[in-house]
Image (cartoon, coloured by chain):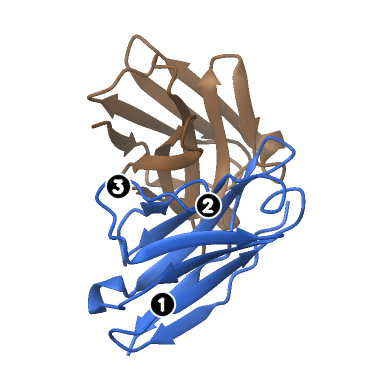
Amino acid sequence: QVQLQESGPGLVKPSQTLSLTCTVSDGSISSGSYYWSWIRQPAGKGLEWIGRIYTSWSTNFNPSLKSRVTMSIDTSKNQFSLKLSSVTAADTAVYYCATYRRDLRSFDYWGQGTLVTVSS
Amino acid sequence: QSALTQPASVSGSPGQSITISCTGTSSDVGGYNYVSWYQQHPAKAPKLMIYEVSNRPSGVSNRFSGSKSGNTASLTISGLQAEDEADYFCLSYTSSNTLVFGGGTKLTVL
């Protein structure tokens, strides 16, 4: 089964860019079975879908974050990445990467999550 | 896009059944059979419990079932067990080719 692991800085300063990477194991990121996705969860709150990437030119983003989000895929490293610009304290959350299965229309594999705090 | 509407909390005694609702619009829940449900225990990643409204992944107990009527999807858990105590989230595909979660429901097993 696919395994996912998020990595990146746990602390980001306000107005800077948050950058996270998700490494995929036991599965190929070139597989056509998945949308590679990012989801976040502020402490004590609900899940928020950030966006997904299928290929380097096929992405969908949450309209509320679209202007600040970039996603990319690195097939050579079997990784996909998230960049969120101009962060504020409201972007403090646990960030999950997950696989959205195209046939089941649902998230079947999740990373363990990584806490990103926005603070000076 | 607005989050789907779920009750903040539900509770039930062991052995009982509970239902969690997830209300959206004709542009999301009502327009597609692409509603899924997730269980999340504290400090853990969510786990898929139901996909495409009413289908259970392999390994998920048949005590969990899903349904949909109009713009509202529902998750029913029968024969409540202590281990079912968790947060539950619904997710829907939308007409804008995006995804939207529900606000989440905390299930307490009394």
Which secondary structure lies at badge 2? Answer: loop
Relative vertical location of residue A31 with respect to residue B4 in this rendering, above or below: above
Q: Position of residue B66 (x, y in %)?
A: 48, 60
Residue name at image x 53 percent, y 58 percent: B90
In front here: A102 or B8? A102
Q: Which image quarter is the C terminus of chain B in?
A: bottom left
Q: Residues within 10 Å of mark 1 (few under 14, many from 20)?
A: many
Chain in blue, by letter, is B
Quarter of the view holding residue A89: bottom right
Name the disc covering residue B53, or none. Answer: 2
Which amino acid, mark 2? Val
Name the disc covering residue B5, or none. Answer: none
In front here: B63 or A82? B63
Relative vertical location of residue A58 with respect to residue B78 in this rendering, above or below: above
Chain in brown, by letter, is A
Residue name at image x 52 percent, y 21 percent: A54
Relative vertical location of residue B106 with respect to residue B104 in this rendering, above or below: below
Q: Position of residue A53 (x, y in %)?
A: 53, 25
Q: Going by the image, does A113 lie left or right of B99?
A: left
Q: Are marks 3 and 1 in contact (CB under 8 Å)?
A: no
Report the residue that reaches farthest toward the top. A76
Which secondary structure lies at badge 3? Answer: loop
Which secondary structure lies at badge 1? Answer: strand
Camera-side mark, 3 or 2: 2
Quarter of the view holding residue A51: top right
Q: Position of residue B96 (x, y in %)?
A: 74, 37
Camera-side mark, 3 or 1: 1
Pinpoint the chain carrying mark 1: B
